[in-house]
Amino acid sequence: MELNTDRNSKKYMLKRFFDEYLDLKRSKEKEQVTVDSIRNGVEFKGTNLWVLIFATFIASLGLNVNSTAVIIGAMLISPLMGPIMGIGLAIGQNDFELMKRSLKSYLVATLFSVTTATLYFLCTPLDEVQSELLARTSPTIYDVFIALFGGLAGIVALATKEKGNVIPGVAIATALMPPLCTAGFGLATGNLLYFLGAFYLYFINSVFISLATFLGVRFMHFKRKEFADKDRERLVKRYIVLITVATMCPAVYLTYNIVRETFYQTSANNFINHELKFPETQVLNREISYKDKEIRIVLIGREIPESQIVAAQEKLPDYKLGGTKLEVFQGVNNGAADISNIKSLVMEDFYKNSQQKLASQSELIDSLQSQLAHFSGSNLINVKVGEEMKVLFPAVKTISVSKCLQLEVDSARIDTVTFAILGCSKQLDTAEKDKILQWLKARTGASKIQLIIEK
């Protein structure tokens, strides 16, 4: 009996803990305010559309010049999240009219974004493929998770009073704008693979943000749309289910392939790192093709016997890579390795090392110059000091200031002393010397100054 009481007490305390810290109702906004906020962001007419066009230009420029900061700025400006979250809200509330509006706005926004990006990349003189562009052509399982959790964060933030900076953060994390611009780049350059890969990424992101919005709406128990006509209600639900299934089926299939490819890539990299690691030999290049079930490796250094490569190949099934073809190329004389690629890798490595050395040497030079100026006194006197000296002490014709190390022989104590050598047109009295000494201390910031007068 006491054991049951103790268990019930623990369950009660655990439930109270979760209710206190994870209860979404604690700061929940009025439901209608949240719904209206999402509905207002669905429309893509007038201002919203022009903002989208300008954001597309900014993102395209950022991708073109490989500037992450510019791309982030474009994602913050872009209003693309509106119709995507509108679709999720419509499914969650059984609102077919909102779904039609959201889908229409989504298609219009997508069309205008791709068209704008295509026109930009057709006109720009910069046609080099940058790393930021390449990053938007091949979606991974991580993109799926980012879109899902980003969408959940977005709907939870919209449904609370303390929205903070969550919505801008979601816009950056889910990255809807860059894939559309990359798709435009693919069309402008005639590269169908870039277009399909980028559009694939955009579609996956859109679907999982909508799914997250739907889950958030249902979890927070948003009020569903009620119909007086039950037959119409059943028809609306049927349409919504059909559209949802038609959208989710390809998304689920594509996501399944992404998951399989991710696992394959991970297994292949583990195989390379463990089974093709040889002393005095380095993996120069690796190409893993999930589609062709092929691993191509270029080794450089001491040549590996064929027997060891065959032994490594026999271990492929241990890494769940059965049926994968392994090709290992050694050296660069057999034509297997791309010489130009190797040269570019070597030059890139040389350039990076040179840049690092130049940066460190530049820092060292600046430090030495600063120390030299400190001890030579070049930072203590200038033309302005001479002009002040001329007004305050007309008898002084020349001035030399430098720092020097002074050793006290008895105590072996070393100190830094500033020497000021003045060339004067007449003999100075004690009062004038003291006045010059005090002025020099104030002017140079030196605590100890040895004044030497020359006539």
Image: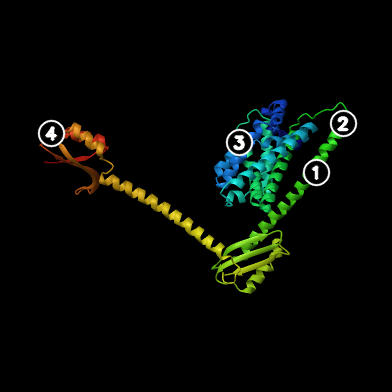
Q: Amino acid at mark 4?
A: Thr
Q: CA distance from mark 4 to mark 3?
A: 72 Å
> Could you tell which of marks 4 and 1 lies nearer the N-terminus?
1
Q: Is residue 87 above or below residue 281?
A: above
Q: CA distance from mark 2 to mark 1?
A: 21 Å
Percent position (x, y) of residue 279? 55, 68
Q: Residue at the location (53% across, 63% down)?
A: 343
Q: Amino acid at mark 1?
A: Ala
Number of the front mark, 2 or 4: 2
Q: Quadrant of residue 390?
A: top left
Circles 2, 4 touching at the beta carbon (< 8 Å): no
Say the numbered circle drawn on residue 77. Answer: 3
Circles 3, 2 touching at the beta carbon (< 8 Å): no
Q: Amino acid at mark 2?
A: Arg
Q: CA distance from mark 3 to mark 1?
A: 31 Å
Q: Is residue 122 above or below residue 55?
A: below
Residue marked by disc 4: 430
Percent position (x, y) of residue 380? 26, 40
> Could you tell which of marks 4 and 3 lies nearer the N-terminus?
3
Could you tell whether 92 is left or right of 60 in the image? right
Say the numbered circle drawn on residue 182. Answer: none
Percent position (x, y) of residue 309? 64, 70
